[in-house]
Image: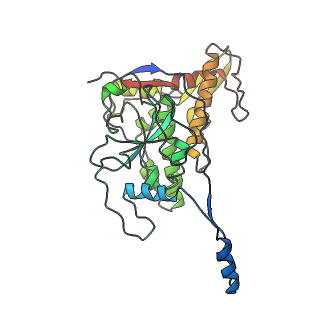
């Protein structure tokens, strides 16, 4: 089923700016357990004239993957009967750790310690050990850790990803007062990247599976212009899409516009968020890799908030290209966090 861009009932917003995004790149080392026959067993095997079985390695995370599949109401393997379906379908929320306290990663064997305030994390909600009648419980993971459990090249997992924003926090079971100051909510750039990443990967999956239907991805012209052309030199909003109120329209057309255009001193430059961060790779850590590139770029962009129009902002990271003034300005703008306007 092709992913779509939905508009939850929009809320008025205000902007809070967060430029202290951690740069720690998450990685995980998973030890491999080997089952090896003991000497007596090997000797007995040779006496019987049979060679011993080859050593087999067991992935210690297999049981955790099966536990997740059962939690989602998926069969253990193809053709097997499905378990009892959950009363509330679990979702995968990408969010920021609130400033209150650090939390532990739920992946067995995680070696990266606690998830720190301000860090991006994945919240499995409801959690595997919680009450499936409500969304009051969550399991928290480093995003690269959860990528070891969930196969995002499958629509079964991909469609459950939800960026936590001003429009989706109630779906997560949070109160407006909990997010009014920007806690939990994602920066605008992360919100736009995750949504576009889902659409891009959804198209690739549909084409791979032979079920691609272009009509499933077709948007009304005014919506397409707003989501993909806002901020560009050619963007001329004809009208506000009927599903959006004025506040959300302004947010998408200004604060969260994916393009940045500059024309000074005879020099033209146009920068695009999606082209800069969404690649063609579809590996295990595709999502976390994209978000890590974004976080590094944000750190670089804020290093020189007063860079001259002729200078590029360089990076000490070998795999992070230099940022032009236009790119740095766009990234700083997109690092703002749109929040609900009131706590009502």
- Position of residue 189 relative to residue 4, above or below, is above
Q: Pick whichever, 210 or 268, lies toward us.
A: 210
Residue visible at 66% across and 75% down? 40
Q: Is residue 47 above or below residue 12?
A: below
Choose between 289 and 195: the one closer to the eye.
289
In which quadrant of the rendered view does residue 252 lie? top left
For the residue pair 124 and 54, the one nearer the viewer reads as: 54
Q: Is residue 174 left or right of residue 146?
A: left
Q: How is the image coloured?
A: rainbow
Q: Where residue 50 sits: x, y (%)?
A: 68, 84
Closer-to-camera residue (87/266): 87
Report if residue 278 is visible in the image.
Answer: no
Looking at the rendering, in which quadrant would you find the C terminus?
A: top left
Give coordinates of residue 120: x percent, y percent.
50, 34
Residue 294 appearing in the image: yes
**Residue that sits furthest to the bottom in the current view:** 49
Residue lying farthest front?
Answer: 40
Coordinates of residue 122 in the picture (x, y in percent): 46, 41
Q: Residue at x 30, y 21 (%)?
A: 342
User: Would you say 142 lies left or right of 181 here?
Assistant: right
Q: How many marks?
A: 0
In the figure, 82 relative to 118: above or below? below
Q: Where is the N terminus found, in terms of image quarters? A: bottom left
The vertical placement of 59 against 103, above or below, is below
Q: Tell me residue 142's x, y (percent).
A: 52, 40
């Amino acid at each position: 089923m092709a992913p779509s861009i939905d508009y939850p009932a929009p809320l008025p917003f205000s902007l809070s700016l967060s430029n202290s995004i951690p740069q720690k790149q998450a990685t995980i080392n998973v030890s491999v357990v080997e089952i090896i026959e003991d000497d007596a067993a090997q000797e007995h095997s040779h006496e019987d004239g049979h060679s011993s079985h080859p050593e087999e390695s067991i992935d210690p995370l297999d049981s955790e993957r099966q536990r997740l599949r059962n939690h989602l109401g998926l069969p253990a393997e193809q053709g097997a009967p499905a378990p009892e379906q959950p009363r509330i379908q679990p979702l995968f929320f990408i969010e920021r750790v609130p400033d209150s306290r650090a939390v532990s990663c739920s992946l067995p064997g995680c070696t990266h310690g606690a998830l720190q305030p301000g860090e991006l994390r994945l919240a499995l909600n409801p959690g595997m050990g919680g009450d499936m009648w409500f969304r009051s419980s969550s399991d928290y993971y480093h995003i690269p850790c959860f990528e070891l459990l969930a196969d995002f090249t499958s629509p079964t997992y991909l469609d459950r990803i939800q960026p936590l924003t001003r429009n989706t926090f109630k779906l997560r079971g949070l109160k407006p007062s909990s997010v009014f100051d920007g806690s939990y909510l994602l920066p605008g750039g992360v919100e736009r990247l995750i949504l576009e990443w889902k659409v891009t990967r959804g198209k690739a999956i549909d084409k791979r599976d032979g079920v691609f239907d272009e009509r499933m991805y077709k948007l009304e012209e005014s919506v397409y212009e707003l989501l993909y052309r806002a901020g560009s030199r050619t963007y001329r909003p004809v009208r506000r899409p009927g599903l959006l109120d004025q506040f959300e329209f302004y947010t998408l057309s200004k604060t969260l516009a994916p393009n940045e255009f500059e024309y000074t001193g005879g020099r033209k430059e146009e920068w695009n968020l999606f082209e800069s961060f969404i690649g063609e790779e579809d590996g295990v850590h595709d999502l976390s890799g994209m978000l890590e590139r974004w976080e590094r770029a944000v750190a670089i962009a804020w290093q020189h908030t007063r860079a001259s129009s002729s200078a590029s902002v360089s990076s000490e990271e070998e795999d992070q290209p230099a940022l032009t003034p236009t790119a740095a300005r766009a990234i700083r703008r997109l690092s703002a966090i749109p929040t609900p306007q009131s706590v009502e």
